[in-house]
Each structure stands twice: as structure tokens, then as C-alpha cells.
Image (cartoon, rainbow, N blue to C red):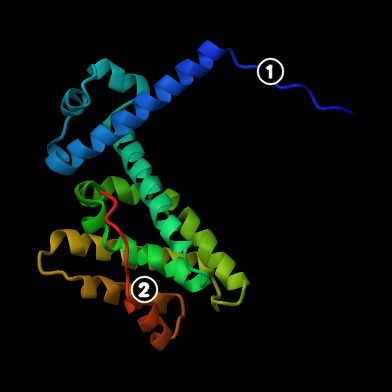
Amino acid sequence: MPGKAKKAVAPELGRKAAYVMRNRAALLHSTQEVLAIKGQAATIEDIAEHAQIAVSTVYKHFKDKDALISATILNAFAEWESWAESLALQSNDPLEQLVLPMRLFVRLNKTHPYHAQTLVNYFGVAARIVPQLQVKLIAHVTALNKAKLLNLENPSTAAKHFHAVITFAVVEQVTNPKATEKDADESVRAALRVLGIPDDLAMKLAHSPLSFETNR
């Protein structure tokens, strides 16, 4: 039996939806810039002024400041994730595809400084949305475990611990002026042990030559 025909969307409604989405995306980017620069002192008024919109418009998109900050962090992470995955897919090695984004993540302060500073400034908010930030990593580690490339009794728990080590390495890179890229890669190496990867292989994966262009 033929399926039901999809109801057509009026062109004007489609244009309105696209306009709303563009405005929302612009607001999230403006918010990130303000949060990175002003930190906890940032207000909705600061954000609205920077975005050149009315405060009431901000509340049309988000119910309060916490909701706006959470959405901003999630949006920033999604953008970074897409960028990092595009680089990782240039490798045919499944383990390198896992590790490269993590090596890029600990360099967040260099590649995406607004992302890094916002994460540090609002670490409490980021901590509340950690489960949403871990979804793809858990799926990736689980898939590698099923493929016998990892040997983990509980891949989900291991992935969460791995993510914790990497996240605190990012914080160290942002807050410690003496932190080096070698320190960043050593953190990745340590995190790989959480996944049961032998140290000689972890050393190779975490310290191999890394070449990429700074995104922003």
C-alpha cells in the first residue's frame, strides 16, 4: 500500500524557520564570544548588546541564561567535533580515528580559543551536560571493543573515564601558562591506558607527528 504523501510546507513557513535558525546560530556564536571574554560576569544584556539584538529576542530562543549557556557549549562542541572528525577520517586506522580528535581536543586552547575559555569559565555548566558531550565517544569505544580492537569489560565506563582525563587536560592547557603540547600528548597517552591500550602503542598514537591547520 503506498505511503501517505508528506504534507507540503508553505514556502513562507520554510523561510521563517530558516531565518529563526540563522538568528539562533548567530546568537550562540555571539554568546560564546562574550562568555569567553567576560566569564561569569557576563549578563544577558551583555550578550544581547554584542549580538545587536533586543534582550527580549534572547528570551524568545532561551528561557534563561543557564539554558543559553548550555546550548552555547553544546553548539561549540558540535562544531569542534565535526571539524576534528573530518581530520580523523583522513586516516584508515580505527585507533588513530579515535585518538586524533582527543589530541586535537587537548589543543583546544590553540585551535578554538573561545571554545576552550568558555569551557573553563563555565566548567560547572559543562559538567552538567557531560552525558550529551560523551555520546559519540562512548559509541566509538563500544564499536572498537566489539571489533576486538579494544578489550574492555565495560566500554561505556572506560570511555567516561577516558573523557574525564582528556577534559582535565584541556583545563590544564588553558589555565597553566607552563603547560606544553608534550604535556597534552602525555595526558592522551595516560588516557589511552584507561582503554587498556599497551603503553608502547599508546606512546606511538599519542606522540606521532601531528599536522593540522588552526580552525579559528
Give the residue type at disc 2. Ala
Say how many tags the image has. 2
Query: Residue 95, image x and y in percent?
Result: 48, 73
**Residue 124 versus residue 201: which sits nearer the camera?**
201
Q: Is residue 166 visible?
A: yes
Q: Residue furthest right?
A: 1
Judging from the image, what secondary structure is the residue with disc 1 in?
A: loop
Neighbourhood count class around disc 2 (C-alpha, 10 Å): few under 14, some 14–19, many 20 upward: many
Residue visible at 12% across and 37% down in the picture: 41
Instruction: Return the mark for residue 207.
Output: none
Residue visible at 18% across and 36% down in the picture: 34
Query: Residue 188, image x and y in percent?
Result: 33, 72
Mark 2 or mark 1: which comes first in sequence? 1
Instruction: Return the mark for residue 7.
Output: 1
Q: Is residue 72 above or below residue 64?
A: below
Judging from the image, what secondary structure is the residue with disc 2 in?
A: helix
The picture quadrant where one finds residue 99 is bottom left
Give the residue type at disc 1. Lys
Query: Residue 30, image x and y in percent?
Result: 24, 33
**Residue 94 versus residue 190: which sits nearer the camera?**
94
Instruction: Return the mark for residue 191.
Output: 2
Q: Is residue 186 above or below residue 163?
A: below
Residue visible at 50% across and 61% down in the picture: 138
Q: Is residue 62 visible?
A: no
Q: What quarter of the picture does the N terminus occupy?
A: top right
Query: Residue 67, image x and y in percent?
Result: 33, 33
The picture quadrant where one finds residue 153 is bottom right
87 vs 126, left or right, is right
